[in-house]
Amino acid sequence: MDIIEAIKGRADSLVVIDDALAPPNFAHISAEALTAQYRSLDANPDHCKILAAQLGLKEDSTPSEVMEVVGRDASSLWPQYIDGTTKVTLDPLFEELKLKHTASKLKEQLLVEFLELQFGVRPQVFLSLADAKEALKCCVVAFVDFYIGDVNSEDEAIEAHAQFREELASRFEFDGTPWPKLVFLVSSKLPSQRGLNSFRERTGMRSAFFSALSKRDFSHDFLARYVDRIVGRYGEAAQLDGYLQTIKKSIHRAAESLAAEVARLELHDLTTLKSLRLDAESESLQGYLTWLLSEALAVKLRSDGELQSSLLPGEARYTPLDGKLLPGSVLFELFSEIAVAPIPNADLAAHVTMGDVFEITSGVKKDEVILVVAPACDLMRCATHYEVLCVRGTIDSQGSELPTLIAKKYAFGKGHIVIRSVEDGKPLYRCVRWDHKRLTTIRHGELAGASYKRIARMSEIFVQEVKELALSQVARIGTPIDPSFSVAVQLAVRLRISVGKDTPDISFFADLSDREFVQAVLAMGRSAPTEGDGSAEPGDLQKTIVFSYQFQEWIVGELNNLTPANGEKNEKLTRIIAFFSDPEFSKIELKPNGVTSELGGLISFSLKTAPPDTDQSKAGIEIIAFPMQIPTTPGIEV
């Protein structure tokens, strides 16, 4: 998909929505300007006749009669003045107003001129979202002012845009196929990162097709670089989006197919199933049907015809990290629910089963949990005094934000699990470490009592993996490999380079915590097993720091500003600048100890649990990543 072809192929492809492009307030026309216009008409009868004709007056109207109408209806003359048809006759009236008005909208006008020059298409300009409603539905690219209209806060602005969610998230047609539009949010003062995430969630836009631009950065060079980068990656992003759209359609087809089969079920078949089979197995009809139908739905989705073909190229370049947007946690949430699902605590006596996770409600060990590993068939028909085999575990850490898992031992598999639940409407993540040496038995009746509370149920593959660690008799069935999860981190930079005996060192320190962009993202996931080692286990937990392009531009600019006191070129500084200026520089894989060096130790990357101090103990440059500092009650500035 060539989005440039789509832009150039239709006149309605570009939309700019910004009330700063509104006409001036004609009440601000000065008395001096009105007097100057009168004198111009009085001195040039031909000009007076031309203007009288344009206003629908008699040709022999006096300058006073003409100016009386001009004073009442100057706004109707403004478009003609701007397009040049009456420039000579209206210069005295509008020249001063035009200068002031043009100065107040330089950035916005620059954007309109850039788009027309870049794509050869004149953008449609609107002063409100309501006016642009129809144009938004079919445009290819939209530039939308954030604080548009009568809004007084970040939340009010987000709410105003959310009213046009359908239009902002709509798709345009090209060659008979719907494609996602590109939306650029512009403002002299952009919302916070959380505000931008809230904006995208409320308007339903994917980050790959959404960007935030500060008007303060507007220039032809800046816009050309920024727009070219987004447009250049559109094809790969649109292909990935198309795959997700196919998944959605497949889910709907699978659900509709299963619903049709459920409609064919006869009640007497369920009665027969219960009386002849389930009663003998002490299995409930509801539990069996829930299992059967969920498995059937999964099989229908996996076998869907559209998902059997290759929808994504193996070497696709996906959208680069935008430091103004926080990474999402949908993959983490989906995988955590598959691995260990929250489950209600009701009716425990009839439903204790293998994989149930209990927290201890009595005693002082509030960080201890219990995992049931007894076979499910034993638990189906056991008495209350039956000793249920369990493994004890410890909650190593917990928190309501994903960044709290940074620098902590989070994992899925190898005796670890992350339990995600919702407490008081907010997510709660608990990192649990199962101690396979602490096998224990608890009576079935006690688990249903007040001393224990069920909080989740682990999927069978994870339970079997813990059970295999605890009981050597159980054959190993493999360790699941969790996908790579990402959280935003903040960076600090320390530099010290020795110049000479009589010249002060080049030194520099910067804490980027207060910057308006995410400097980097920490991606974590297990590596594949080493080839040829005969092991099925995945490797160690890998930590990779992916840097945003904003950070790369910032650090190259700061390093270029550093100059030795003696004015001579420094070889080490030159090598460091060349390293960060390399277009291929975007990520660094950390070693198991959390530190990685480049250029023979001249550059060091590390992951810490807290912001560093300003002291520079070693020569070279250090890039230090640490967890994002999340305020308890984020403030909102407008």
Image: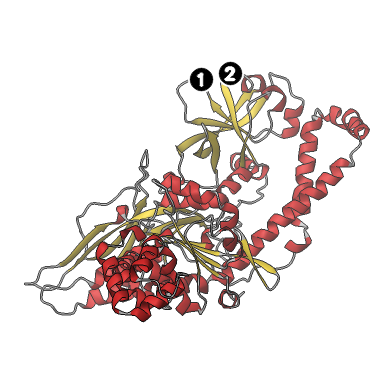
The quadrant where residue 53 appears: bottom left
Q: Is residue 609 left or right of residue 544?
A: left
The quadrant where residue 436 appears: top right
Furthest residue in direction left, as rendered:
502
Q: Is residue 417 left or right of residue 74?
A: right
Q: Is residue 485 left or right of residue 602?
A: right
Furthest residue in direction front, as rendered:
60
The residue nearer to you, when weighing 27 against 460, is 27
The residue nearer to you, when weighing 396 against 309, is 309
On the image, the x and y values in percent for residue 562 come to 20, 71
State the residue position of label 1: 362
The residue nearer to you, when weighing 149 against 71, is 71
Q: Residues within 10 Å of mark 2 (few under 14, many from 20)?
A: few
Please give the label number shown on residue 333. Answer: none
* Residue at x 35%, y 42% (from the top left corner): 635
Q: Is residue 140 above or below residue 196?
A: below
* Residue at x 24%, y 65% (from the top left corner): 32
On the image, the x and y values in percent for residue 332 come to 55, 49
On the image, the x and y values in percent for residue 623 come to 31, 61
On the image, the x and y values in percent for residue 492 come to 29, 57
- Residue contact at pointers 1 and 2, CB within 8 angstroms: yes
Amino acid type of the residue that numbered disc 2 sits on in the rendered structure: Ala
Residue 409 appears in the picture as rendered: no
Amino acid type of the residue that numbered disc 1 sits on in the rendered structure: Ser
Q: Is residue 383 left or right of residue 168?
A: right
Q: Earlier in the sequence, mark 1 or mark 2?
A: 1
The quadrant where residue 401 appears: top left
Q: Residues within 10 Å of mark 1 (few under 14, many from 20)?
A: few
Please give the label number shown on residue 450. Answer: 2
Q: Secondary structure at mark 1?
A: loop
Q: Is residue 378 above or below residue 125?
A: above
